[in-house]
Amino acid sequence: MKPYMTKYSSSWRRTVLKKDCRFRRIFCNMFYQITEKKKRAGRIYYIMFTGIIEEKGRIKKIVRNQIFIESDLENKKGDSIAVQGICFTVADVGENEFSVQAMRQTKRITTMQDWKRGDYVNLERALKFDGRIGGHIVLGHIDEVGKCIRIKKNEYYFQAGSGNARYLIPKGSIALDGVSLTLSYVSGNIFAVSLIPYTLKETTLGRLRVGSFVNIEYDYLGKLLARRINP
């Protein structure tokens, strides 16, 4: 195999960059940023999710900026976990529960400001690099909050900010409240996704109503490509 197909190191990156192909240069830089290392206490972590929800947790209580969530997932302090699509660090772990701490900005730009005791939330632990990517690459960095404006059978329509319309690609990927979905309809800043019964049952999207708000994260690869083609 070619070096760029087997290694994800800096030497692998330099090998690919030598190729006189614009697409390869773009792809290489995108992949390098996705697999960027995050160091904590001398250990290296890769923070990435796939949009495949593992469990619906339930908010036990909220104390200032700390959220306590009932969950059967195995977590430990310092782990990364996506809650409603938002990447958090596990601050503490108890019996069938864990807690995360939120920054003020996170509350301001996400649906977290509306969370309350008893609410269900989508949970997904960070992906291990020997695992499968069942959905698409999700980083847990929310771009904006969207609003559900119409529901027609299994088609759910949302309105996004006009400035982010270029990231809406028909048949492309999008994460809503942390759930990896495919865009079935796009018109300007209006888009729709099709939700199957399983998704409605196993995630919080089953509680969507017209007027509901969701956390939106656009496809990271699409955002990087759009920035490089049209900065």
Image (cartoon, rainbow, N blue to C red):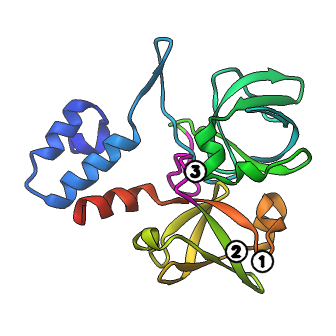
Q: Secondary structure at mark 2?
A: strand
Q: Quadrant of the N terminus?
A: top left
Q: Is residue 49 left or right of residue 58?
A: left
| Secondary structure at numbered mark 1 | loop
Query: What span is colored magenta in the figure?
Result: 131-144
Q: Quadrant of residue 72?
A: top right
Helix, strand or loop at disc 3? Answer: loop
Q: Main secondary structure of the magenta part?
A: loop
- Asked whether disc 1 touches disc 2, contact meaning CB atoms under 8 Å apart, the reply is yes
Could you tell me if the residues under marks 3 and 2 are in contact, i.e. CB atoms within 8 Å?
A: no
The residue singled out by tag 1 in the image is 210
Q: Which mark is residue 148?
A: 2
Q: Which residue is mark 3?
A: 50
Residue at x-position 60% and y-position 76%: 159
Which residue lies at the image location 69% right of the left edge and 80% below the top edge? 149
Q: Nearer the viewer, residue 52 or 220?
A: 220
Q: In the image, is 57 to the left or to the right of 182?
A: right
Query: Residue at left 29%, top 59%?
Result: 227
Which of marks 1 and 3 precedes in the sequence? 3
Quadrant where the C terminus sits is bottom left
